[in-house]
């Protein structure tokens, strides 16, 4: 198939970017979207031009690196699919395709299609872990977990941290990502001891990073390649209220003790 590409090119974070037009001939419908970009880059190198910078790693829809917006949609037109797993058979011969980086205040562009999504890492470091010492590896059945909680935790843990939710949200909110990371630990016994501090710390870090607030547009859920539900945002809001009350009660207790 023959395609017309408009690819966002930006030398660095300080430069102004612009779309660059490229004509692609004979693109195989069986190739993946990233393979198509690989072919484009080979052509650019042969012409003595700089290749398009884009992120990738596993190319199996697992790592979340292939974060780009395709025709206005994070990861492209196919639902529940990352850009690396998107195949060219989802397009038609003669199509025009616009490719640009994720657009969000908290995801500054580094170069071309590459954005700095380290804000997610900092939110994770703020509390997305279990630090309680458990000693040796316990017997698998020693800590029973009810099936409903296990299923919910597993679904939330499917988040790959790609940032599509932020790019799709009109407010640039990271609530779906943060909710998924908080929920999958909060539902398990190992995560219970730090539940209140985890919620407070991660939400505080999310706000510091400059992400927008959630106003229930629901675009995050639609763009998520792993189908993370916005019901976890409801749980996050509830847990945040609980953590705020817990912090106030603890502070009051310490003041009385003094």
Image (cartoon, helix red, strand yellow):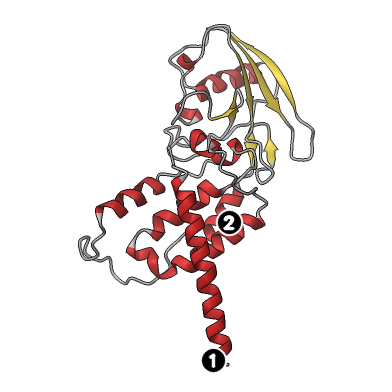
Q: Position of residue 85 (x, y in %)?
A: 44, 27
Q: Is residue 11 visible?
A: yes
| Image quarter of residue 109 | top right
Q: Quadrant of the C terminus?
A: bottom right
Could you classify mark 2 by the number of other residues whose Cα lies within 10 Å: few (under 14), some (14-19), or many (20 or more)? some
Give the residue drawn at x 55%, y 86%. 254
User: Is residue 44 shown above or below 93?
Assistant: below
Give the residue drawn at x 45%, y 49%. 232
Instruction: Tell me how far mark 2 sits from mark 1, CA to CA.
Output: 34 Å
Q: Are marks 2 and 1 in contact (CB under 8 Å)?
A: no
User: Is residue 143 shown above or below 109?
Assistant: below
Depth check, mark 2 against mark 1: the one in front is: 1
Residue of label 2 = 122
Q: Position of residue 139 (x, y in %)?
A: 21, 64
Side of 212 relative to 241 (left or right): right
| Image quarter of residue 149 | bottom left
Of 83 and 38, nearer the camera is 83
Q: Position of residue 222 (x, y in %)?
A: 49, 33
Q: What is the secondary structure assignment of the residue under circle 1? A: helix
Number of residue marks: 2
Q: What is the secondary structure assignment of the residue under circle 2? A: helix
Could you classify mark 1 by the number of other residues whose Cα lies within 10 Å: few (under 14), some (14-19), or many (20 or more)? few
Side of 148 relative to 100 (left or right): left
Give the residue drawn at x 56%, y 18%. 39
Q: Position of residue 234 (x, y in %)?
A: 48, 51
Q: Is residue 127 visible?
A: no
Sequence-wise, the earlier of marks 2 and 1 is: 2
The furthest residue to the bottom: 258
Residue of label 1 = 257
Give the residue drawn at x 64%, y 49%. 211
């Amino acid at each position: 198939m023959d395609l017309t590409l408009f690819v966002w090119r930006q030398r660095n974070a300080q430069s102004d970017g612009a779309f660059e037009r490229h004509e692609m001939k004979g693109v195989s419908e069986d190739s993946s979207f990233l393979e198509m970009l690989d072919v484009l880059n080979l052509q650019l190198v042969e012409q003595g031009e700089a290749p398009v910078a884009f992120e990738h790693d596993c190319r199996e829809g697992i790592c979340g690196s292939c974060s780009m917006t395709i025709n206005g949609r994070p990861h492209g037109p196919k639902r529940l699919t990352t850009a690396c797993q998107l195949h060219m058979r989802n397009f038609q011969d003669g199509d025009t395709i616009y490719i640009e980086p994720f657009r969000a205040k908290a995801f500054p562009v580094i170069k071309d299609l590459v954005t700095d999504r380290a804000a997610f890492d900092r939110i994770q470091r703020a509390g997305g872990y279990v630090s309680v010492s458990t000693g040796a590896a316990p017997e698998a059945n020693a800590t029973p977990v009810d099936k409903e909680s296990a299923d919910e935790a597993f679904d939330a843990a499917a988040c790959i941290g790609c940032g599509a939710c932020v790019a799709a949200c009109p407010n640039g909110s990271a609530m779906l990502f943060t909710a998924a990371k908080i929920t999958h630990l909060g539902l398990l016994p190992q995560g219970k001891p730090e539940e209140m501090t985890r919620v407070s710390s991660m939400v505080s870090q999310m706000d510091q990073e400059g992400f927008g607030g959630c106003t229930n547009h629901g675009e995050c859920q639609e763009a998520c390649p792993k189908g993370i539900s916005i019901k976890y945002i409801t749980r996050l809001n509830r847990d945040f209220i609980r953590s705020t009350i817990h912090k106030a009660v603890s502070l009051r207790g310490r003041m009385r003790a003094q």
